[in-house]
Image: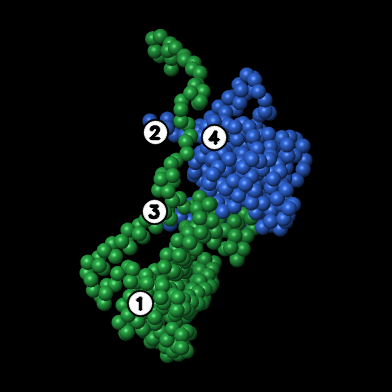
Amino acid sequence: MTAIAGSAVPLLDVRGVTLQYKTRDHLVTATYRVDFEVFRSDRFILLGPSGCGKSTLLKAIGGYLSPVEGEIRLKGEVVTRPGPDRMMVFQEFDQLLPWKTVTENVMFPLVASGRLAGAAAREKARDAIAMVNLAQFADSLPHTLSGGMKQRVAIARGMAMEPDILLMDEPFAALDALTRRKMQDELLQLWDNTQFTVVFVTHSIPEAVKVGSRILLLSPHPGQVKAELNSLPRGDGASAAEAHHLLEHRIHALLFADEVEKERVLS
Amino acid sequence: MTELSASPRPEHYRQPVDAATFGIVEKPLSGWERLGNNGAARKLALLLVLALIWETYARWLNNPLLFPTFTATLSAFAEATASGVLPGRALTSLRVLLIGYAIGIACAAVLTTIAISTRIGTDLLELLTSMFNPLPAIALLPLALIWFGLGYGSIVFVIVHSVLWAVALNTHSGFLQVSNTLRMVGRNYGLSGLRYVGGILIPAAFPSILTGLKIGWAFAWRTLIAAELVFGVSSGSGGLGWFIYENKNQLEIPAVFAGLFTVILIGLVVENVIFRTIEVRTVRRWGMQT
């Protein structure tokens, strides 16, 4: 996949991005000169321990904050503000508008951005909702849905917009383990159908290996690129499971090697 | 884990029993239980008890000039209603009230929109509310009389004053409480300005806004009746406050109570019918309030 993509122009180009944000008493550097490229149909994972600035990085791609150094380009255009060409799926369950039904929630960005109107928008929304297997809840209000269902609506909302890139900020982190595995499978199925481009933030190594096609490893305080790896082809069976385990161990070693050494020095 | 114990623990398999074999899975509640769950029925019962206490106390006191009985108040109410005096007065009051309320809400909307979009606007709103919210509307009445003359203008002015700050304060604090995720969602859709306020902030802050509207309504009533008591009549037709004042002067105490009763009645209807309906259709339906 990267071989094909490598010849093309990247969809998202992140060049030397340093991000800083202010808390009450400190100016915090979240990431330092991060570079990576995302190509069309990538399932690009930002992976790292907490405090590596991966969520901040995703928010910068979303346009919520601008880098103090470097630049983020989407299809050659510098990202300056949030917009519906980069739909976000957040971790929080309260990302759906509680005063709108599932269908209205999925329709709203289509209508608000002027992409579709009326019956066409409704039709599109119904299709997206059917894709995430929620057709029978299309007229329910968000507070009557479970956490997993809310996240599926959020994904449907993102997909209905057909954005250039779907940004997912630990979308399954607040779910229970069983639901999370199911959602990961469903996401991969959706990808098989439409081959959308997604940037996915997670702190779970198994999730990264399972969901991603390409994985960016970040080191903490501030976030810097440690490695950019290819994930494994998907597959079942013992050999695939074995290969996944090996990759997980390799990533684990890459992410936590320094800390082990530090601990040795200290002890 | 099983390796640690001396002998492996046996595994169990069981077949769940069919639900039909254990009697009650779901049973409708009895009529009384359902009546007890109805808020309107509970409140009606409370009202009846309060009326009964009133009646008993007034009969025991036996001084119609100080405290007429509930039945005497009711008959005075019926009489004044039948003669058309009381409905006319109530209508006059309501008209002034609604004009003042609407203008107050419009001003509050403008002020909070400015406050949410600029920092200096926030400062302005905070400063103005802390200055004027504690100021009783009635204290402005003498000034209003000089500015707007002896008429509806003055009353509308003081009502606007009493509504504006309560609604603006609650709306603004509601806006500030809107979750950051929802804000980011709104901006993700590319909403800004008035579309952002109308599409995201107002519905998301609706519980607080509704509280503000209720407080504003109550303040408006108080101010109106007080203002009418002070000067009340203009161009021939006074409002409820004037009705109360007039009857007090004539020592028609049951009619005074009937006037107060009307204020209470309108308050009950507005709170329990209008505001309750809005609440059920919006914040309750959306699961923002239980």
Q: Chain of mark 1?
A: B
* Coloring basis for residues: by chain
Mark in the foreground, 1 or 3 = 1
Proximity of marks 2 and 1: CB atoms separated by less than 8 Å: no
Q: Which chain is blue?
A: A
Mark in the foreground, 4 or 3 = 3
- Mark 2: secondary structure: helix
Give the residue at x 34% y 77%: B256
Proximity of marks 1 and 3: CB atoms separated by less than 8 Å: no
Q: Chain of mark 3?
A: B
Q: List the residue tagged with mark 2.
A: A266
| Earlier residue among tags 1 and 3 | 3
Q: List the residue tagged with mark 1.
A: B255
- Evaluate whether residue B280 shows in this view: yes
Q: Where residue B132 sits: x, y (%)?
A: 40, 76
Q: Which image quarter is the C terminus of chain A in? A: top left
Q: Where residue A58 sits: x, y (%)?
A: 59, 47
Q: Which mark is residue B42?
A: 3
Mark in the foreground, 3 or 2 = 3
Q: Chain of mark 4?
A: A
- Mark 4: secondary structure: loop
Give the residue at x 56% y 39%: A148
Q: Where residue A124 sits: x, y (%)?
A: 72, 48
Q: Which chain is green?
A: B
Q: Chain of mark 2?
A: A
- Mark 3: secondary structure: helix
Q: Where residue A94 sits: x, y (%)?
A: 53, 48
Amino acid of disc 4: Ser
Q: List the residue tagged with mark 4.
A: A204
Amino acid of disc 2: Leu
Mark in the foreground, 2 or 1 = 1
Is disc 3 in the same subunit as disc 2? Answer: no
